[in-house]
Image (cartoon, helix red, strand yellow):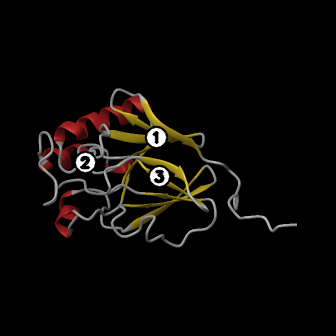
Amino acid sequence: MKYMFASDIHGSAYYCRKMLKAYKEEGAKRLVLLGDLLYHGPRNDLPKEYAPKEVIQMLNEKAREIYAVRGNCEAEVDQMVLNFPVLADYCILVIDGHTFYATHGHVYNKENLPPMQDGDILIHGHTHVLKAKKMDGYYLLNPGSVSIPKKDNPPTYAVLENSVFAIKDFEGRIIKSIVLDEAIGMYKKLPAK
């Protein structure tokens, strides 16, 4: 099954439409949203077509296909208007034999790892900077930001299919990709002989 990952919509109706169009064109069966869905927060400029009520309507139409986690801009009032859970700090997904710890990134990140095992995958947003990297004992993935990318990145999302995690722009071009190895414990150092 194909999954799509996206983060940091920040209330942009323009980029929410682009994201949902890409979701349809990709043929993904689930959309995993990594937080900061409706509000831009005090540190960000208003994104293009800032219209949280429109974003609410668009996302609610896909409620049965969305898994979401709470970002640092989410509040209890958001749950009152969204028809899918948005207040969990993390979500554990097992996809094609891979265990994903999906979170926003403001609490758990490479500086503060959640409880994971060798070969697990930490995927988060929050930084607005895309990433697909093997670390020491785990994978670190970030689909970037749908609406407010940083560090000269374009607006992006990611798809996962057949153990390939591909970060794409809204023209469908692959910006970065990584193949997730199936081996568990692949990073353990072998004892010297």
Judge whether 174 appears above or below 135 on screen: above
Q: Quadrant of residue 25?
A: top left
The location of residue 152, given as percent across then percent down, is 29, 40
36 or 93, nearer to the observer: 36
Asked if one can make out residue 27 in the rendered structure from this viewpoint, the answer is: no
Q: Given contact means CB atoms under 8 Å apart, are the residues at marks 3 and 1 in contact? A: no
Label 3: element kind = strand
Mark 2 sits on what residue?
Answer: 9
Q: Going 34% across and 26% down the picture, which residue do you hit?
A: 171
User: How far is disc 3 from disc 1 in space, using C-alphas?
Assistant: 11 Å
Q: Residue furthest right?
A: 193
Location of residue 156 in the rendering, given as x and y in whole percent from the top left corner: 34, 39
Q: Nearer the viewer, residue 117 or 94?
A: 117
Q: Which residue is mark 3?
A: 141
* Residue at image coords 73%, 64%: 189
- C-alpha distance separating marks 3 and 2: 17 Å
Mark 1 burial class by Cα count in 10 Å: few <14, some 14-19, many 20+: many
Residue type, label 1: Val
Residue for badge 1: 159
- The quadrant in which the C terminus is found is bottom right
Question: Would residue 152 be seen by someone viewing this image from the given angle?
Answer: yes
Q: Residue at x 44, y 71 (%)?
A: 112
Along the line of sight, the residue nearer the viewer: 24 or 133:
133
Residue toward you, 80 or 175: 175
Q: Position of residue 92 (x, y in %)?
A: 49, 63
The disc at residue 32 is none
| Location of residue 38 with respect to 185 vertically, above or below | above
Q: Residues within 10 Å of mark 3 (few under 14, many from 20)?
A: many
Of the image marks 1 and 2, the number of the one nearer the N terminus: 2
